[in-house]
Image: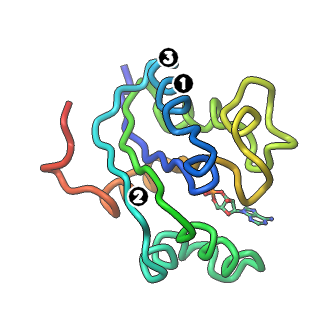
Amino acid sequence: MNIQQTLSIIKPDAMKLKYSGKIIDFLEEKGFSIIAQKKIVLTKNQAEAFYIVHKDRPFFNELVEFMISGPIVVQIIEAKNAVSLYREIMGSTDPDKAEEGTIRKLYGSNIQCNAVHGSDSVENATTETSFFFNKLEMIK
Ligand code: CMP
């Protein structure tokens, strides 16, 4: 079994709409275990660093402002093939284009305020989980 861990972020839009409990419940129903979890508010520097791969995209500044606009929940979640499974149940970046029954279809508002983030590769999952958590914070 290819057990993997991936990073999940419940974004400020979903937090403001009080969807965090529903999203956590959804993840557990789909078979994910929560290995680490915390509620934080990102600083501008932290948000810019996390999304550095998007620094040349036209939406970068707007994305950073959105991600620092309120609390987020960051999680390490674990399952068989966690990276691809989470991307499947998140749905497309744009909630309007997301498949029925996916998190972004259910809880996202628009292409920016799309409820959740999930790592897009196994390599990035390692980088992103260690951006937010150290080993002491991870409990199996
Ligand atoms: P995420 O999976 O966190 O990765 C990058 C984020 O940028 C994405 O989700 C959206 O929140 C945001 N994003 C992507 N494309 C656009 C866009 N065209 N306009 C505004 N925000 C976007």
| Residue for point 43% across, 77% down | 43
- Name which residue type carries label 2: Glu
Badge 1 crowding class, 10 Å Cα cut-off, few under 14, some 14 to 19, many 20 or more, is some
Residue in front for this viewpoint, 58 or 108: 108
Vertical side of 118 occupied by 57: above or below: below
In the displayed structure, does residue 96 sit left or right of residue 121?
A: right
- Name which residue type carries label 1: Phe
Q: Quadrant of residue 138?
A: top left
Mark 2–mark 3 Cα distance, whole angstroms, equals: 24 Å
On the image, the x and y values in percent for residue 107 come to 69, 38
Residue identifier under label 3: 29
Residue identifier under label 1: 26
Mark 1–mark 3 Cα distance, whole angstroms, equals: 5 Å
On the image, the x and y values in percent for residue 35 come to 28, 36
Q: Quadrant of residue 92?
A: top right
On the image, the x and y values in percent for residue 71 come to 47, 59
Residue identifier under label 2: 128
Badge nearest the viewer, 2 or 1: 1
Mark 2–mark 1 Cα distance, whole angstroms, equals: 22 Å
Quadrant for the C terminus, please.
top left
| Residue for point 63% across, 69% down | 66
Vertical side of 121 occupied by 4: above or below: above
- Could you say whether the residue bearing mark 3 is in a helix, strand or loop? helix
| Residue for point 73% across, 23% down | 101
Vertical side of 85 occupied by 6: above or below: below
